[in-house]
Amino acid sequence: MSDADDITRNYHRGNVFSIRANENAAPGKQSKRTLILDFMIKHYPQGFTCDEVMVRLGVTAYHQTWSARYSELCKDMLIVPTGESRMTRSGSPAEVHRVVLFLT
């Protein structure tokens, strides 16, 4: 697994336990990204914060896991900022993103 596969590497600075956790999470990463992306496509053009996606998908735990998948979609430019922000359940402002649709 390369550094590019770990969206949070800069945050945890190579902590061995974080690296192992990332490796353990690897098998489920794509399915979580797909769930998020499918949800956002279904509700296009509405934008969502990561917190809103989690609420709508019924995910109540493991925010770090889901936010990392959301960040990967941002990094891969599959979801992009709308220029808006909304408050999360904890009262913090969060950026709203919208899925990018590629027309062929």
Image (tube, rainbow, N blue to C red):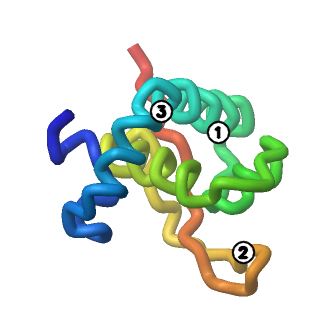
Camera-side mark, 2 or 1: 2
Residue 39 relative to residue 77: left or right:
right
The disc placed on residue 40 is 1
Quarter holding the N terminus? top left
Marks 1/3 in contact by CB < 8 Å: the verdict is: no
Crowd band around label 3 with a 10 angstrom C-alpha radius: few (<14), some (14–19), many (20+):
some
Q: Earlier in the sequence, mark 3 or mark 2?
A: 3
Q: Identify the residue under disc 2.
A: 88
Residue 92 relative to residue 22: left or right:
right
* Alpha carbon distance from label 1 to label 3: 17 Å
Q: Earlier in the sequence, mark 2 or mark 1?
A: 1
Local SS, label 3: helix
Is 16 or 43 nearer to us in this picture?
A: 16
Amino acid type at image mark 1: Met
**Which residue is rendered at x = 47% and y = 33% of the image?**
29
Local SS, label 1: helix
Q: Earlier in the sequence, mark 1 or mark 3?
A: 3
**Which residue is rendered at x = 46% and y = 37% of the image?**
25
Q: Identify the residue under disc 3.
A: 29
Amino acid type at image mark 3: Lys
Crowd band around label 1 with a 10 angstrom C-alpha radius: few (<14), some (14–19), many (20+):
many
The disc placed on residue 66 is none
**Which residue is rendered at x = 72% and y = 75% of the image?**
88
Quadrant of residue 20 within the rendered picture: top left
